[in-house]
Amino acid sequence: MQAESSDIWVDIPENSSLFYVAHCLKKAGLIEKSWLFVTRVFLSGKRKKIKAGQYCFSPKMSYTQLMEHLLAGSIVLHKVCLPEGVTVTQALAILKRNPCLKGPLETCPPEGSLLPGTYYFPKGALRKNIVLRLQKAMTKELASLAPFAGELSAEDFLKLASIVEKETRHSHEKGIIAGIFLKRLQKKIYLQADPTVIYGMTQGQSTLGRPLTRQDWNHDSPYNTYKNKGLPPTPICCPGKETLSSVAKAAPSDFLFFVALPDGTHAFNATLDKHNQQIAQNKEQRSKHINKLSRK
């Protein structure tokens, strides 16, 4: 039901009697006589427990239309959106800010265990139940993708997917980057993934707020894949369905290196020499761009 500005919203509490429902409708100005509405419901033979929740009514609805809308349990569903790549801390903050949810979040779920996406829920849903729903969605998604690329365990697959999620927003690159990391894992060389360094510095509480520097690569953290071989101790974010699917299908790549280009895409190379040439070319292009701007 598409809500309009003239529509009337009514909250029906849990375990409300038919008489109390009629009281709520009268209070909202939808009916004039409570007893008449109750009588209509009884005479219809459709009497049943009315589902608790928030309802949206048109002020033009007749007694019969109001009754059918309530008996159908057509409660309003509100949505919450978790973007791909959010950390668990950021996801919980989104849930805490949502005024249609209630209840505390007693525990913090493991990093990466929530599946991003758009979810719908009734007003008054418990935040802890929404978290459980997001966790079940991630568990189901992982089960549908097994077995994973590179014979990874579900835990390591989720770690790898979380890194890829943070490395690129471009769909066509995700499988390639996953393949590069798979090859690096096979060769037992450092992943050298910048997002892992950032996570180690922020613990997923916030963004870094500035570009990563070479000095940051020396930051002492178990998440720093410039200093520690293999995957980080945990995922570094909650990867979305597209990334999970791309990583699940990835195979070790012929490439071993990649570097970001000015337009946000990446250049991929098989050798360190080619990789360094690309970095030098990027610096030259950036320098020319800065000089061009300074002359304006």
Image: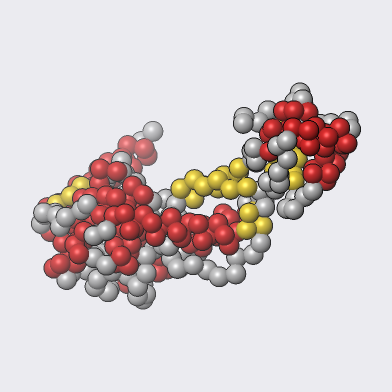
Viewer-proximal residue among 226 and 286: 226
Vertical comparison of 186 with 79: above or below: below
Where's residue 19, x and y in %?
84, 44
At x 22%, y 52%, the residue is 249
Quarter of the image containing the N terminus?
top right
Quarter of the image containing the C terminus?
top left
At x 66%, y 61%, the residue is 103
Pick out the residue farthest to the top.
60
Where's residue 9, x and y in %?
74, 37
Q: Quadrant of residue 288?
A: top left
In the rendered structure, the answer to whether residue 53 lies left or right of residue 234 reads right
Viewer-proximal residue among 219 and 284: 219
Q: Quadrant of residue 215?
A: bottom left
Viewer-proximal residue among 122 and 257: 122
Say if residue 221 shows up in the picture. yes
In the rendered structure, the answer to whether residue 220 lies left or right of residue 7 reads left
At x 49%, y 45%, the residue is 118
In the rendered structure, the answer to whether residue 235 lies left or right of residue 225 reads right
Viewer-proximal residue among 151 and 51: 51
Where's residue 90, x and y in %?
51, 58
In the rendered structure, the answer to whether residue 239 lies left or right of residue 152 reads right
Vertical comparison of 150 with 221: above or below: above
At x 25%, y 43%, the residue is 172
Where's residue 188, x and y in %?
17, 71
